[in-house]
């Protein structure tokens, strides 16, 4: 894979974009930075027709970015009607329903030109004081999370959408929101093995293609660096010990768990050096440009290993799949019935 340093820097980035349509300035910036991914939020959605037009335009860019979204159900939904308003993962209840949920969500997203869903949550809801996970988790049981989340991911993949498990190595036992500050999980390695790592081990065995890091400090694993910045966690634990061969994507580098201490460009370089393949920069489009320039400079100076980033680019390129089984018309009666069954189960 022959790429300039500028192209290689762009290949590491998933960027947010400002609005529901590509204006000239945004299009020009995307052509210059050449990100390999774009993430969409509520600000990017007005209607199904508009979303299809936007994703088609994005796919036609020279870097052919994969289009991603956070679409879990419940509190985490970036699109509205006519997409089905599925309830939170907690209401799935059993593996059959979880797999049906993943397939239904994927069919709807595929119909709009989405490639990746940043779901399922592999965190275990083990701390009632957790402000960020709660019912986003499938269960408070590690074994149940492993069973249901992997079923959900199978359903997504069957319908041609790339699932992403999150947040490695586990965000369920925090009592802080990493959007606002750096959480700490003070558990021993044995305790992490017994709870947090159970769903991730299952997802790795199932071949999940994409895993997202947590901006959380785990002193038993690395007393100095949160997972996103930790070679001990990403390389030694995830790659070597767990045997993970897929793509490692950071959570948003603009979240205050990192950005309070590191400018986004420095966080980008540190994440790549730790073992991330792909970096999320979700909100301020100017930060994507800053990250790209900082990564390019780090490649030129030798601070970053170009061969390692080429390996990352190959892993990201291998994610591409052909959507299948999408639904042309929304709302979908079958999916509404599934939603109602989940709500009735509560």
Image: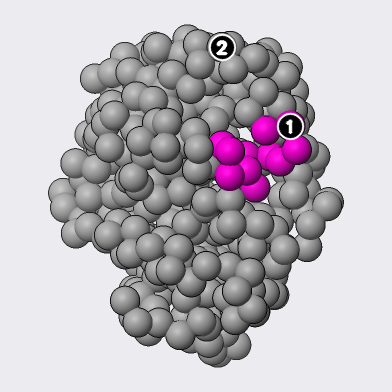
Q: Position of residue 245 (x, y in %)?
A: 34, 45
> Where is 217 relative to 126, above or below?
below
> Where is 258 relative to 336, above or below?
below
Foreground pick, 342 / 139: 139
Horizontal placement of 49 versus 118: left or right? Answer: left
What span is in magenta? 222-233
Residue 269 is labelled as none
Q: How is the image coloured?
A: one colour
Report if residue 245 lies within the magenta region: no
Q: Secondary structure at mark 2?
A: helix
Location of the N terminus by quadrant is bottom left
Q: Position of residue 334 (x, y in %)?
A: 22, 34
Q: Earlier in the sequence, mark 2 or mark 1?
A: 2
Q: Residue at x 24, y 43 (%)?
A: 157
How crowded is the residue under tag 1: few (<14 C-alpha within 10 Å), some, or many (20+)? Answer: few
Q: Residue at x 47, y 57 (%)?
A: 277
Question: Can you tell which quarter of the image residue 289 is in?
Answer: bottom right
Location of the C terminus by quadrant is top left
Q: Position of residue 145 (x, y in %)?
A: 42, 18
Q: Is residue 92 visible?
A: no
Horizontal placement of 245 versus 187: left or right? Answer: left
Q: Position of residue 184 (x, y in %)?
A: 74, 28
User: Which residue appears farthest toward the front when viewing the image?
Assistant: 302
Residue 190 is labelled as 2
Q: Which residue is mark 1?
A: 223
Question: Can you tell which quarter of the image residue 153 is in?
Answer: top left
Q: Residue at x 50, y 37 (%)?
A: 236
How crowded is the residue under tag 2: few (<14 C-alpha within 10 Å), some, or many (20+)? Answer: few
What separation in Å lies between label 2 and label 1 (alpha carbons)?
16 Å
> Where is 212 relative to 125, above or below?
below
User: Which residue appears farthest toward the right when viewing the image?
Assistant: 260
């Amino acid at each position: 894979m022959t790429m300039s340093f500028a192209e290689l820097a762009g290949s590491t980035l998933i960027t947010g974009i400002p609005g529901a349509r590509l204006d000239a300035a945004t299009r020009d910036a995307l052509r210059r930075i050449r990100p390999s991914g774009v993430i969409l939020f509520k600000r990017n959605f007005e209607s199904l027709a508009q979303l299809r037009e936007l994703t088609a335009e994005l796919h036609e860019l020279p870097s052919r970015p994969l289009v991603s979204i956070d679409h879990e159900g419940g509190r985490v939904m970036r699109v509205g009607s006519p997409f089905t308003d599925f309830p939170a993962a907690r209401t799935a209840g059993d593996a059959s329903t979880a797999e049906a949920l993943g397939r239904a969500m994927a069919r709807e997203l595929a119909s709009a030109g989405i490639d990746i869903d940043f779901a399922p949550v592999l965190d275990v809801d083990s701390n009632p004081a957790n402000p960020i996970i709660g019912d986003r988790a499938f269960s408070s049981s590690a074994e149940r999370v492993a069973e249901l989340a992997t079923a959900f991911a199978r359903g997504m993949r069957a319908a041609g959408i790339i699932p992403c498990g999150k947040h490695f190595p586990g965000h369920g036992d925090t009592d802080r929101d990493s959007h606002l500050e750096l959480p700490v999980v003070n558990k021993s390695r044995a305790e992490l093995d017994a709870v947090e790592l159970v769903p991730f081990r299952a997802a790795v065995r199932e071949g999940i293609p994409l895993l997202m890091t947590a901006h959380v400090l785990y002193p038993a694993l690395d007393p100095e660096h949160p997972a996103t910045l930790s070679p001990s966690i990403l390389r030694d634990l995830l790659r070597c010990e767990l045997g993970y061969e897929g793509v490692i994507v950071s959570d948003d580098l603009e979240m205050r768990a990192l950005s309070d201490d590191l400018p986004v460009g420095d966080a980008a370089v540190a994440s790549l050096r730790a073992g991330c393949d792909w970096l999320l920069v979700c909100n301020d489009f100017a930060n994507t440009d800053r990250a790209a320039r900082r990564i390019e400079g780090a490649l030129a100076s030798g601070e970053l290993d170009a061969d390692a980033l080429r390996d990352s680019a190959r892993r990201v390129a291998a994610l591409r799949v052909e959507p299948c089984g999408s639904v042309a018309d929304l709302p979908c009666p079958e999916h509404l019935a599934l939603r109602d069954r989940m709500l009735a189960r509560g």
